[in-house]
Image: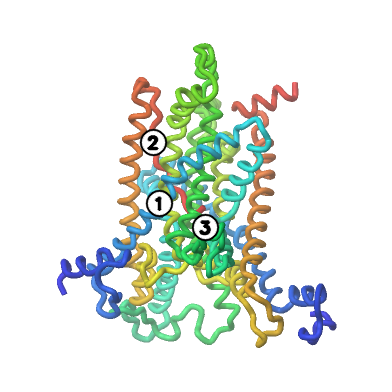
Amino acid sequence: MSCWQTVQDYAFRSIGYGENLLPRTDFTLCQQVTLIGSGLIWNVYFGALALAFGFFFAIAVALAKSSRHAVLRKPADWFVFVFRGSPLFIQFFLAYETLQLLPKAGIEVFGITVETAWTTRAWAGALFVLFLNTSAYAAEIFHGALKSIPRGDLEAAEAYGLTGFQKFRRIQWPTMLRLAWPAYTNEAIFLFHATTLVFFSGFPAFRQMGDALYYANYFADKTFNPFVPYPIVAVYFIALTLLLTFVFGLVNRRLNRHLPSNQKSRIRLRPQIIR
Amino acid sequence: MFAACADPKAIEGLTWLTCYLTSGKHLDFYWSFLTVLLLLAITAPTALAMGFAGATAARSRFLPLSLLGKGYAAIVRGVPDIVFFLFFVIALDQGIEYLKSLAVCDDPVWPWQGLEFRVCQEAKVPLGASAAIWHQAYGFGLAVFTFALVFGAFAANVLYGAMGAVPKAQLETAEAYGMSHAQVFRRILVPQMWVYALPGLSNLWMILIKATPLLFLLGVKDIVYWARELGGSKTQAYEYPHPDWRLWYFLGLLVFYLLFTKVSEVVLARLSARLAQGQATAGGEALRKAAA
């Protein structure tokens, strides 16, 4: 079987298109690269969606955390503490066990049955945990940025008669984003790395359609040789990291476009492990 | 455990719970908390030592040594998280067995043949016939080494940055007083760098705490393993039948980790206040003002 044939069979296997059965004997390098790359679709899915939703929720939490009212501040504090203070791995297990307790038949709300069976699937449940987790980490970053907005900027805004939401939208929000962006870039990278934990976490891989690490682990188990699949995963992730840095770098350049070049905040890659 | 627990079917209520929580398997579960603490207690100083060695090597004026130090930090930090954990333990295990096979086997052959890794019986580490405790200890040792190597790279990076943050003028003054390089390093650089290193190191400590559930992936019977094992529903065939309680076990683990990180946070905050004393930093300045 030619390599091109393998690519056609397996490139989208992780989302249900193409060959149904995984290869069982005579594993080729081409199969490993293709299938692990196919699994990467899930990592990108988890990372991108959690990041997209988490961005807005994180800003809301950061604002609540710097609120003067304890009613808003305390829940935000606790949210950040719980999700940053415990291992993501444990959060996955806990979420899975909790979601399993939901009645299988669905919940009756105002006469309509809300389906609950899908929540124990990795694609939904794991995404939910990742969303909350990244929100907590990003909220801490945004909170820090909110606090380090120069006081002069805020005073100037007030002198111009900006108050409330206007002040937030025109001054606080753009400055916060600009200050937080390098740290937020790193957070995005950790999030993508953290997606590898999903299929080791209690959430089942549906019909052997797993993420990159799932397939890498499959090959490592079958061939007793970890020296091929895991480096493939590593290379894929390094490429993903470079792509992310590039995209976030573009945004960073736009956020800093009004500043002289000596004041621009630079994105520095700070890879970190496990959360 | 207790005399009253002799017949689990006959007892009820709190007594049942007490008996349940002190059963043999639960004692193993409690021990596994100590395993985690032991792992941290061994890993943290080892990683710090490796980080110190790495950072010192990276600062060396002898080029190969400095490249070695920088390369160590760069390579380990570049590879994504658990890929390294999964990969490295197997690689280390096979590497050790291969080296041993060179020494003890009659005719050592290249062990990676086709799809399998094969060494002769005598080269297995630990030997197939040795007691279970040795297998556990070996697995634990591999895990500790992997953790220490990974976190050592991060510590090296932090310490390297901290060494660079010590004001240059201080080092130059020390040299002007006639101290040798080793003396400057020992008396000026090392005592002062900790205050700059502490934020990074405390961050690392937090990550290390949160990385401990991964022991489960490395094949050590840790708290996650036991929580899954004990929490799963037990039918009448078992001594203490109960429904699926994994949720409660994992909730317990969550609380354990939250408490642990909270306590660490408090201790580290105190430590950083202590270290800031008399330093030429904003923190030190605040302390000076508070005292005056």
Q: Amino acid at mark 3?
A: Ala
Q: Residue at x 52, y 57 (%)?
A: B148
Disc 1 chain ID? A
Residue A243 visible in this rendered orientation of the protein? yes
Disc 2 chain ID? A
Residue B144 visible in this rendered orientation of the protein? no
Q: Are marks 1 and 2 on the same chain?
A: yes
Height in image: B35 above or below A77?
below
Q: Amino acid at mark 2?
A: Ile
Label 2: which residue?
Answer: A267
Label pair 2/3, CB-CB below 8 angstroms? no
Disc 3 chain ID? B
Residue A190 coordinates in the image, percent (x, y): 44, 49
Q: Is residue B175 left or right of residue B37?
A: left
Height in image: A82 above or below B22?
above
User: In the rendered image, which quarter contains the C terminus of chain B?
Assistant: top right
Height in image: A92 above or below A217?
above
Q: Residue at x 16, y 66 (%)?
A: A4
Q: Amino acid at mark 1?
A: Gly
Q: CA separation, marks 2 and 3?
A: 28 Å
Q: CA separation, marks 1 and 2?
A: 20 Å
Residue B273, image quadrant: top right
Label 3 residue SS: helix
Labels in figure, total: 3
Q: Are marks 2 and 3 on the same chain?
A: no
Label 1: which residue?
Answer: A47
Q: CA separation, marks 1 and 3?
A: 28 Å
Residue B148: mark in rendering? 3
Residue B247, image quadrant: bottom right
